[in-house]
């Protein structure tokens, strides 16, 4: 019998990759923290009903991508396919709106969708997202978009484009929806099967089709921006102007619609040229109707989610995985030396140095080789002679310089030791 493997569409994130994930999280955490966003953590599974109502039954996500199951109490549950519905449920359930003002929330974690796995598309994937609840102000849209751009920029990503559109309010969309149906119906035969199927259920999604035949038909299709009410138009102008003021560049894409039903007015995507077919790294928009749809008080909101797998793919193109360096690699041999080394490692760690202790008991030669491979800044060596005198050899791995030092002395002046490490790290 073969060994058990991870499920199709799921991936292990191994130590060589986790450093990139941690970097993304820490950059995002600090940028979001500076903008007064607070983290929220919601459950990974929810009542199926939440997503059906929130995301919309006619969407691909609800229609064919959800991981839904009956639990032992015969309740229908679903592994969350996205983060917004759960955050909004929590916002309502805990009366966060009662605090008044604007709630700026962020989250990160795994999401689940039954999709065909390929590069940048998995069945368990991760998002980092924000939700700004309680503001209709176009500045909220502009701020949220600018912060997404800041995070991506701080991570060193370039060649990204912001695609921007407005899908207006419910009435605007209703009028446009009808116009689109009227235009597409005589062309039905030229559409791909998926789009034909969407014509009655979710015609806006047809705009998103990658099919060449459908794209050709869409060339002459009505433009949603021409169906916006004057108020919706003004609102879109304001968002654009604020982005201009912020120096955030964008391209208007009148075909941009999002896959979830709850969006209103502003929708956007941040796309990369370097991701092949799965080009969208970050997607979001305004969703003024969702909180009431889920039973809460009327609350305007805007948010986005970054697909972390796609972001990590881009980061790896920039910089192959970085090895995390420890300050010291500690080698020892002989009973007394090994015991002292264990203690020395603990004391150094308590003084906030990072130490990897070699536990192999093998010959010094082999331990030295591992020290070189470890990427440590310095090697500490403890043999019989050092154990006898309570000393240790301190060898700087970049230069090979080596000195004997009393263990007590090594621990007595952590500031100087820290400076020596930094100097060695900076020396080329
Ligand atoms: P797509 O058109 O790529 O299917 P979507 O419209 O379904 O995207 P959203 O629901 O808006 O995507 O999710 C936001 C982001 O999450 C996407 O832009 C993408 O980066 C990421 N994402 C969505 N689905 C997956 C998946 N199955 N695997 C990996 N990342 C995903
Ligand atoms: Mg999708």
Image: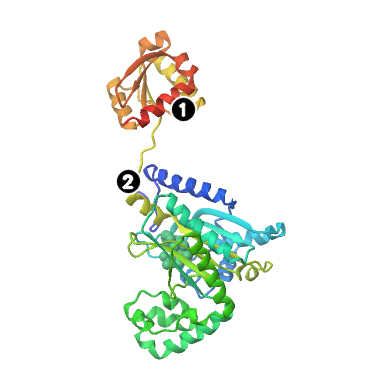
- Compared across the picture, whether 302 is left or right of 92 comes to left
Q: Residue at x 45, y 25 (%)?
A: 418
- Compared across the picture, whether 5 is left or right of 262 comes to left
**Numbered disc total:** 2
Q: Residue furthest right?
A: 98
The kind of secondary structure element at disc 1 is: loop
Q: Residue furthest bottom?
A: 186
| Lower sequence index among marks 1 and 2 | 2
Tell me: is circle 2 under 8 Å from ligand 1.
Answer: no
On the image, the x and y values in percent for residue 132 come to 59, 60
User: Residue 85's image quarter?
Assistant: bottom right
Please, is residue 105 above or below residue 369 in the view? below
Which sits in the foreground, 125 or 183? 183
Which residue was labeled with disc 1?
353
Label 1: how many Cα within 10 Å (few below 14, some 14–19, many 20+):
some
On the image, the x and y values in percent for residue 115 come to 41, 65
Q: Is residue 10 visible?
A: no
- Compared across the picture, whether 282 is left or right of 394 comes to right
Q: Quadrant of the C terminus?
A: top left
Which residue was labeled with disc 2?
320
On the image, the x and y values in percent for residue 86 come to 58, 60
Whether label 1 touches label 2, CB < 8 Å = no
On the image, the x and y values in percent for residue 341 come to 42, 19
Please, is residue 24 above or below residue 195 in the view? above
The kind of secondary structure element at disc 2 is: loop
User: Residue 118's image quarter?
Assistant: bottom left
């Amino acid at each position: 019998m073969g060994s058990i493997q991870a499920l199709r569409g799921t991936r292990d994130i191994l130590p060589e990759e986790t450093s990139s994930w941690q970097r993304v999280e820490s950059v995002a955490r600090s940028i979001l923290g500076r903008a007064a966003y607070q983290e929220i953590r919601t459950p990974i599974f929810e009542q199926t009903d939440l997503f059906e109502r929130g995301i919309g039954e006619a969407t691909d996500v609800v229609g064919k991508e959800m991981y839904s199951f009956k639990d032992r109490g015969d309740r229908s549950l679903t592994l969350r396919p996205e983060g917004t519905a759960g955050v909004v449920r929590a916002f309502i359930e805990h009366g966060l709106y009662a605090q008044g003002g604007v709630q700026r929330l962020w989250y990160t974690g795994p999401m689940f969708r039954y999709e065909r796995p390929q590069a940048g598309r998995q069945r368990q994937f991760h998002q980092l997202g924000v939700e700004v609840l309680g503001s209709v102000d176009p500045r909220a849209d502009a701020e949220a978009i600018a912060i997404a751009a800041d995070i991506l920029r701080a991570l060193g990503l370039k060649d990204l484009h912001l695609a921007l559109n407005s899908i207006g309010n419910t009435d605007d969309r209703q009028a446009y929806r009808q116009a689109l149906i009227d235009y597409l119906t005589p062309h039905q035969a030229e559409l791909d099967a998926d789009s034909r199927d969407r014509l009655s259920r979710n015609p806006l999604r047809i705009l998103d089709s990658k099919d060449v035949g459908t794209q050709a038909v869409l060339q002459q299709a009505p433009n949603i921006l021409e169906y916006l009410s004057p108020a919706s138009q003004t609102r879109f102008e304001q968002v654009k102007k604020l982005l201009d003021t912020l120096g955030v560049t964008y391209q208007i894409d009148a075909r941009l619609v999002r896959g979830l039903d709850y969006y209103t007015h502003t929708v956007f995507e941040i796309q990369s040229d370097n991701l092949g077919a799965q080009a969208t790294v970050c997607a979001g928009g305004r969703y003024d109707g969702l909180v009431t749809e889920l039973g809460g008080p009327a609350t305007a909101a805007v948010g986005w989610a970054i697909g972390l797998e796609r972001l990590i793919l881009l980061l790896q193109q920039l910089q192959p995985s970085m090895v995390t360096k420890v300050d010291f690699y500690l080698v020892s041999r002989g009973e007394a030396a090994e015991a002292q080394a264990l203690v020395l490692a603990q004391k150094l760690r308590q003084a906030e140095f990072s130490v990897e202790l070699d536990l192999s008991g093998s010959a010094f030669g082999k331990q030295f080789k591992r020290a070189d491979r470890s990427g440590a800044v310095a090697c500490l060596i403890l043999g019989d002679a050092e154990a006898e005198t309570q000393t240790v050899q301190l060898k700087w791995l970049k230069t090979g310089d080596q000195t004997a030092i009393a263990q007590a002395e090594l621990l007595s002046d952590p500031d100087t030791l820290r400076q020596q490490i930094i100097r060695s790290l900076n020396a080329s």
